[in-house]
């Protein structure tokens, strides 16, 4: 039996030495150390031995088992190391290869303009307010002094969801909602940027969907000169410190008196050119002193409070500032157009 074990050990060690992969190593482990392996077979024959011989052979069998186990482990570590080296050599990285270009996007021109205007008014202490785009007839029209039979409603035909629900035609309902939320109790100033909708045929200057930014200031003793000063600051920051502004009388149902604001033409500096159609002025926005009825419907006592409001179209501002000629460019998502303004 001793000889048997010695032969097993020699054979096993030779096979382990020659093993070329983990699979053959595993096969060797099963063949020698497994339940039906050679060593087990030898141990099964121990019954025929004398009581004195048994412990000697048992000890020897264990020794052989340990030697084989160790040899297998050693070989396995060697094989693994070799495999790793081979992998490292075959998968070398060429650090001199140029990397893949990452496409970085940027804000849409309209987003940039809206944010620029927001920053400007935040700097003057205004709050930013938002409201629903699906609006009730009451907030979109009635609370703004536009009752059902008012002719000015014709200028703002919209997309109706029901008789009482529509896509808002301006951001003015946010003004009404803000006044209501302050319950006529305190002065405030806010701007409300957002998308608005009108039933309009799309062309170079009209779109059925566009954006607006309206502003509203309510306080005691607010005067027309406060409005003019605010708009002058806005014009100079947005279009350059050399811009002059002028106010022309106009009409809006929710302000009285109402004005349109022009800025002096940047191209001709007021002399008259094709951009300003020879007038030297370019129309930018509308505004006025808040109509007493609008204040009253918003919960403010018009004998105590007064206010001014204004509204502008960021598309128009962007078109003037960056020379965009077609309003539809903002919505067609042509990446070539949008990319030009990533650093605007
Ligand atoms: Zn001009």
Image: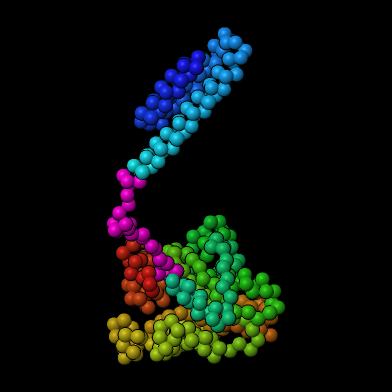
Tell me where residue 329 appears, x and y as whole percent.
35, 66
Query: Is residue 106 a member of the stretch shown in magenta?
Result: yes
Q: How many numbered circles does the render carry? A: 0
- The residue drawn where x is 56% and y is 68% is 130
Query: Is residue 17 a member of the stretch shown in magenta?
Result: no
Furthest-front residue in this view:
52
Residue 187: quadrant of the picture: bottom right
> What secondary structure prevails in the magenta region?
loop
Would you say 253 lies left or right of 83 here? Answer: right
Residue 17: quadrant of the picture: top left
Furthest-top residue in this view:
48
Residue 217: quadrant of the picture: bottom right
Tell me where residue 94 appears, x and y as whole percent.
30, 54
Stretch in magenta: 88-111
- The residue drawn where x is 31% and y is 44% is 90
- The residue drawn where x is 29% and y is 57% is 97
Tell me where residue 77 appears, x and y as whole percent.
44, 37
Residue placed most toward the observer, 286 or 192: 192
Residue placed most toward the observer, 202 or 243: 243
**What's the image's color scheme?**
rainbow
Residue placed most toward the observer, 67 or 126: 67
- The residue drawn where x is 57% and y is 19% is 56
> Could you tell me if residue 218 is visible in this image?
yes
Compared with residue 105, is residue 247 higher up or lower down, i.e. above or below?
below
Tell me where residue 104 appears, x and y as whole percent.
38, 62
The C terminus appears in which quarter of the rendering?
Answer: bottom left
Residue placed most toward the observer, 164 or 261: 261
> Could you tell me if residue 36 is visible in this image?
no
């Amino acid at each position: 039996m001793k000889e048997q074990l010695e032969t097993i050990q020699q054979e096993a060690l030779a096979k382990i030495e020659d093993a070329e992969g983990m699979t053959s190593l595993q096969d060797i482990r099963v063949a020698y150390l497994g339940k039906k392996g050679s060593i087990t077979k030898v141990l099964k024959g121990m019954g025929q031995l004398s009581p004195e011989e048994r412990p000697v052979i048992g000890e020897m069998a264990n020794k052989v088992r340990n030697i084989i186990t160790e040899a297998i482990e050693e070989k396995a570590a060697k094989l693994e190391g070799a495999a790793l080296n081979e992998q490292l050599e075959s998968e070398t990285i060429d650090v001199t290869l140029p990397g893949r270009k990452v496409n970085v996007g940027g804000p849409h021109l309209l987003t940039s303009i809206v944010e620029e205007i927001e920053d400007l008014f935040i700097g003057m202490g205004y709050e930013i307010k938002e409201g629903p785009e699906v609006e009730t007839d009451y907030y979109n029209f009635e609370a703004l002094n536009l009752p059902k039979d008012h002719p000015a409603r014709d200028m703002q035909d919209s997309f109706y969801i029901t008789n009482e629900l529509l896509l808002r035609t301006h951001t003015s309902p946010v003004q009404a909602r803000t006044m209501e939320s302050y319950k006529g109790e305190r002065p405030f100033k806010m701007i409300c940027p957002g998308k608005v909708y009108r039933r309009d045929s799309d062309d170079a200057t009209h779109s059925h969907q566009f954006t607006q930014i309206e502003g509203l200031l309510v306080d005691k003793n607010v005067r027309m000169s406060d409005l003019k000063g605010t708009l002058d600051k806005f014009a100079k920051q947005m279009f350059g410190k050399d811009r002059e502004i002028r106010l022309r009388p106009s009409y809006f149902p929710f302000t009285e008196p109402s004005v349109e604001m022009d800025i002096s033409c940047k191209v001709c500096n007021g002399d008259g050119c094709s951009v300003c159609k020879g007038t030297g002025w370019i129309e930018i926005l509308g505004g006025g002193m808040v109509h007493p009825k609008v204040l009253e419907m918003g919960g403010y006592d018009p004998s105590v409070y007064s206010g001014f409001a204004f509204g502008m179209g960021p598309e128009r501002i962007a078109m003037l500032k960056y020379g965009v000629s077609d309003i539809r460019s903002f919505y067609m998502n042509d990446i070539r157009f949008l990319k030009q303004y990533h650093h605007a």
